[in-house]
């Protein structure tokens, strides 16, 4: 670890500090600030020549500001002769734009991956990409960590497993839900929904018998919260005893925290890949669990050139 340097942007300083504490490595002294016109300026205040460097920065709101911070920090490290630069992006915010949604629309996830690579990153470490194929958008090694071990440990410590059913909130999340159901030896159900327009969803049908079960909705991102709230209502109407939700990335934009607080969800549990807002922290049925130790262990294994995938065996 002696040749390792950890740098943190402004997106999620508490998470970066938790990772540093797990590794026993202090955060590198650096200044990330703005000029009067909001241009971002970075100065690294320690020698990083020949060092194995890790830049910890989620592209959470404001996404574009935090993305530019990441790019400029990577460029600063490259020009300071760092030996290797790993972009640690707990939440990769542009992953939802992974394909053309219609004529004359971009594939922004590919654009952002190109920017990170051209800035000078040698590898990327992220958590629960929205779409697995985004790994292939990078022309550098990319490790996609899974929050499942953290989520499973929390479920086992807070819920009675004999009456639990794992539920995917849509057909696209079945693979993720099935993997969790296998880990906790629980049955699986699926919410079949129709999305009329971005940010809105209508629950159509429940595939599976949820009657009498305590249901766990599992997904990678919760943004507006509409899908989760609708799914919770549909599951309770179908006879579920209670509905919990475990989500890796709590984007929770706009009035999402208030919407969740007023919903029929018994509890929403998110990891701290995104720094919780005051509204999230004050919501009575939203709980944040730490993931810094998992990311820290992945960083340690990367630095030692050891297997990262074995973390999830």
Image: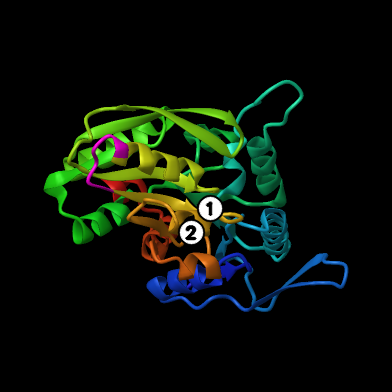
Does residue 295 appear left or right of residue 251 in this picture? left
Instruction: Give the answer, above or below, for where 13 lies relative to 82.
Output: below
Tell me which segment is drawn in magenta: 237-242
Kindly indicate whether the residue at mark 1 contacts the one at mark 2 (C-beta within 8 angstroms): yes
Q: Quadrant of the C terminus?
A: top left
User: Can residue 276 be seen?
Assistant: no
Instruction: Give the answer, above or below, for where 160 lies relative to 178.
Output: below
Asked which secondary structure carries label 1, the reply is: loop
Say which of 244 and 297 sits in front.
244
Residue drawn at 41 percent across, 54 percent down: 305
**Alpha carbon separation for disc pair 2 and 1:** 6 Å
Residue 117 drawn in magenta: no
Name the main secondary structure of what is drawn in magenta. loop
x and y percentages locating residue 66 in the rendered image: 67, 59
Q: Quadrant of the N terminus?
A: bottom left
Does residue 127 appear left or right of residue 278 in this picture? left
Q: Which mark is residue 91?
A: 1
Instruction: Give the answer, above or below, for where 133 lies relative to 228.
Output: above
Which residue, given by chain and number where applicable, does mark 2 sit on?
273
Residue drawn at 28 percent across, 32 percent down: 189
* Label 1 neighbour load within 10 Å: few <14, some 14-19, many 20+: many
Say which of 57 and 30 sits in front.
57
| Extreme residue toward the top, this view | 103
x and y percentages locating residue 273 in the rendered image: 48, 59
């Amino acid at each position: 670890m002696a040749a390792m340097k950890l740098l943190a942007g402004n997106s999620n300083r508490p998470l970066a500090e938790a990772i540093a504490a797990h590794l026993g490595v202090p955060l590198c002294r650096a200044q990330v600030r703005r000029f009067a016109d909001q241009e971002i300026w970075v100065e690294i205040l320690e020698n990083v020549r020949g060092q194995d460097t890790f830049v910890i920065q989620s592209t959470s709101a404001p996404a574009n500001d935090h993305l530019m911070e990441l790019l400029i920090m990577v460029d600063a490290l490259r020009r300071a002769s760092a030996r290797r630069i790993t972009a640690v992006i707990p939440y990769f915010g542009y992953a939802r734009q992974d394909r053309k949604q219609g004529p004359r629309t971009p594939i922004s996830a590919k654009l952002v991956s190109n920017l990170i690579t051209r800035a000078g990153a040698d590898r990327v470490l992220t958590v629960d990409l929205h779409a697995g194929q985004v790994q292939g958008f990078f022309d550098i090694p990319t490790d996609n960590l899974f929050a499942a071990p953290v989520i499973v440990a929390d479920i086992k410590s807070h819920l009675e497993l004999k009456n639990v059913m794992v539920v995917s909130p849509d057909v696209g999340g079945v693979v993720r839900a099935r993997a969790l159901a296998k880990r906790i030896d629980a049955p699986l159900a699926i919410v079949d929904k129709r999305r009329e327009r971005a940010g809105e969803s209508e629950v159509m049908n429940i595939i599976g018998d949820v009657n009498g079960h305590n249901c766990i909705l599992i997904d990678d991102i919760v943004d507006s919260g509409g899908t989760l709230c609708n799914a919770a209502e549909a599951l309770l109407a179908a006879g579920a005893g209670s509905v919990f939700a475990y989500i890796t990335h709590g984007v929770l934009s706009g009035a999402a925290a208030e919407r969740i607080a007023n919903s029929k969800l018994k509890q929403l549990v998110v990891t701290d890949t995104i720094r919780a807002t005051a509204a999230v922290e004050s919501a009575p049925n939203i709980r944040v669990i730490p993931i810094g130790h998992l990311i820290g262990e992945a960083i340690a294994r990367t630095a030692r050139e050891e297997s990262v995938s074995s973390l999830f065996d």
